[in-house]
Image (tube, helix red, strand yellow):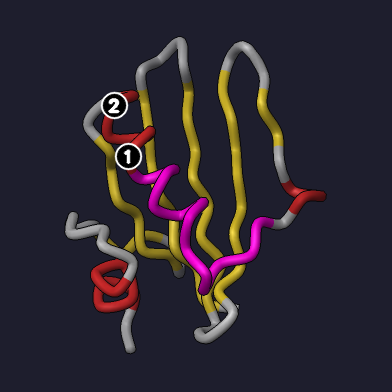
Amino acid sequence: MNEQEYLKQLNINKSGEYSDDAYVVDLLDSTEYGRVFSLLDRSDDLDIMQDNQVVTTEGSSLTYESLSQSYLLSLLADWEGNVYQLVVSKI
């Protein structure tokens, strides 16, 4: 299963692009970021990596590990720059 198929399995139906050994999905705004966060956080197939969480007033970085596939998913936000991404990497 490739990255895009895996995201569809998680009900994330947004296309991305491959960049530096990762699949990057640009999210439109904080609302879409919140929707993706909710889907990732409620998934039984993902385990949040507590040691890799960073949340500040400037941004956040949350990393999840797939329990069934060899993927790490990083949900990134730059609050001030209004930049939001979901990055899927193979492990």
Q: Quadrant of residue 8?
A: bottom left
Q: Quadrant of residue 49?
A: bottom right
Q: Residue at x 36, y 63 (%)?
A: 23
Residue 17 sits above or below residue 37 on the image? below
Magenta stretch: includes residue 83: no
Q: Quadrant of the C terminus?
A: bottom right
In front of the other: 85 or 42? 42
Residue 76 sits above or below residue 23 on the image? above
Residue 80 sits above or below residue 11 on the image? above
Q: For the residue labelled by badge 2, is the local secondary structure a helix, a strand or a loop?
A: helix
Q: Residues within 10 Å of mark 2 (few under 14, many from 20)?
A: few
Write the start and end of the magenta stretch as one range. Answer: 36-48
Q: Residue at x 27, y 25 (%)?
A: 29
Number of numbered discs = 2
In front of the other: 46 or 4? 46
Where is mark 2, residue-wise? 31
Q: For the residue labelled by badge 1, is the local secondary structure a helix, a strand or a loop?
A: helix
Left or right of 86 in this view: 2? left
Q: Quadrant of the N terminus?
A: bottom left
- Between marks 1 and 2, how big is the CA–CA gap? 6 Å
Find residue 52 and name its label.
none
Q: Position of residue 47 (x, y in %)?
A: 64, 64
Q: Position of residue 38 (x, y in %)?
A: 42, 44
Q: Are marks 1 and 2 in contact (CB under 8 Å)?
A: yes
**Three-letter amino acid code of the residue under disc 2:** Thr
Q: Residue at x 23, y 57 (%)?
A: 16
Q: Residues within 10 Å of mark 1 (few under 14, many from 20)?
A: few
Left or right of 75 in this view: 10? left
Q: Residue at x 53, y 86 (%)?
A: 68
Where is mark 1, residue-wise? 35
Residue 7 sits above or below residue 90 on the image? above
**Three-letter amino acid code of the residue under disc 1:** Arg
